[in-house]
Image (cartoon, grey):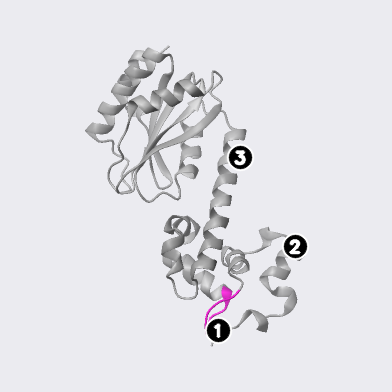
């Protein structure tokens, strides 16, 4: 039988170690165990946390699973699932806020790192854009549409209306590919060209369009610079 939390030397239990030494000394499973508090019959909270991480493919997979999916897992239920989902969402928001304060989004590498973090928990295709100021600092992130696993509809009129309200001088388009491929489709290229032209008309240059797949990303401006010719300075 697996060891229960109460069978562990008190000073070595996850919660006690966290309070004594800080959260950084704990493994991912131990941090999750602190949130879960209890396990299930024959399995400690740490055992349950390790099972979840293995089944979902780590923390990123766990974040993508969503509260409703987690709630039906053995040993969880609605209360524990909600606790995990809330904690993971807070971590996501904090990471996004830190990235937006730290970096000027003036290079594909900076934008790619930002968007990988922002889109980490999405399992369906999402299309959106970043509003940037004249110094290429982030004004706002806009997830405009959530589609199926393959497509996300795009309302160009709504996109430019929001950009004007933001007072954006530059826009970076983005969408993810849940399939894992980074290859742009013909629709991706045509949409980019159309939005580049629209941005030029309102004075908000479309600077790039990034495709994100997991932890990888592709800058269309890098591989298809001709799409952005109308707004090249």
Q: Where residue 199 sits: x, y (%)?
A: 38, 18
Q: Residue tagged by mark 2?
A: 21
- Residue furthest to the right in view is 20
Depth check, mark 3 against mark 1: the one in front is 3
Of residues 62 and 229, the one nearer the viewer is 62
Verify whether residue 100 appears in magenta: no
Question: For the residues marked 3 and 1, what is the alpha-carbon distance in whole angstroms?
Answer: 39 Å
Q: Which mark is residue 193?
A: none
Residue 112 seen by the camera:
yes
Q: Measuring 53% from the left and 69% from the top, which residue is drawn there?
A: 49
Q: Which of the two labelled residues, at mark 3 and mark 2, occupies the earlier sequence position?
A: 2
Per the image, label 3 sits on a secondary structure element best described as helix
- Please determine whether, in this image, residue 5 is positioned above or below residue 115: below
Q: Where residue 28 sits: x, y (%)?
A: 57, 63
Residue 57 seen by the camera:
no
Per the image, label 2 sits on a secondary structure element best described as helix
Q: Residues within 10 Å of mark 3 (few under 14, many from 20)?
A: few
Q: Which mark is residue 98?
A: 3
Q: Where residue 118 sits: x, y (%)?
A: 48, 42
Q: Measuring 33% from the left and 23% from the top, which residue is drawn there?
A: 195
Q: Which of the two labelled residues, at mark 1 and mark 2, occupies the earlier sequence position?
A: 1
Depth check, mark 3 against mark 2: the one in front is 3
Q: Residue tagged by mark 1?
A: 2
The stretch of residues the image draws in magenta is 38-45
Q: Where residue 202 sits: x, y (%)?
A: 40, 14
Verify whether residue 42 appears in magenta: yes
Per the image, label 1 sits on a secondary structure element best described as loop
Whether pointer 3 and pointer 1 mark residues with C-beta atoms closer than 8 Å, the reply is no
Q: Measuring 55% from the left and 84% from the top, which residue is drawn there?
A: 2
Quadrant location of the C terminus in the rendered image: top left
Snapshot quadrant of residue 142: top left
């Amino acid at each position: 039988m697996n060891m229960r939390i109460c069978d562990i030397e008190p000073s070595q239990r996850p919660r006690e170690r966290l309070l004594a030494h800080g959260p950084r000394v704990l493994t991912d499973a131990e941090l999750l165990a602190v949130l879960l508090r209890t396990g299930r019959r024959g399995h400690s909270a740490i055992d349950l946390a390790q099972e979840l991480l293995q089944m979902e493919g780590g923390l990123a997979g766990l974040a993508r699973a969503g509260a409703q999916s987690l709630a039906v897992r053995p040993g969880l239920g609605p209360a524990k699932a909600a606790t995990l989902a809330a904690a993971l969402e807070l971590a996501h928001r904090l990471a996004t806020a830190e990235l937006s304060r730290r970096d000027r989004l003036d290079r594909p590498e900076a934008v790619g790192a930002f968007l990988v973090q922002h889109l980490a928990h999405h399992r369906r295709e999402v299309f959106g854009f970043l509003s940037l100021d004249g110094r290429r600092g982030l004004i706002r992130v806009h997830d405009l549409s959530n589609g199926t696993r393959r497509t996300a509809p795009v309302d160009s009129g709504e996109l430019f209306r929001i950009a004007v309200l933001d007072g954006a001088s530059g826009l970076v388009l983005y969408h993810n590919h849940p399939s894992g491929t980074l290859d742009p489709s013909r629709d991706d290229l045509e949409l980019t060209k159309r939005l580049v032209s629209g941005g030029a008309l309102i004075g908000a240059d479309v600077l790039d369009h990034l495709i994100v797949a997991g932890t990888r990303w592709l800058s269309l401006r890098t591989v298809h610079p001709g799409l952005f010719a109308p707004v090249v300075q």
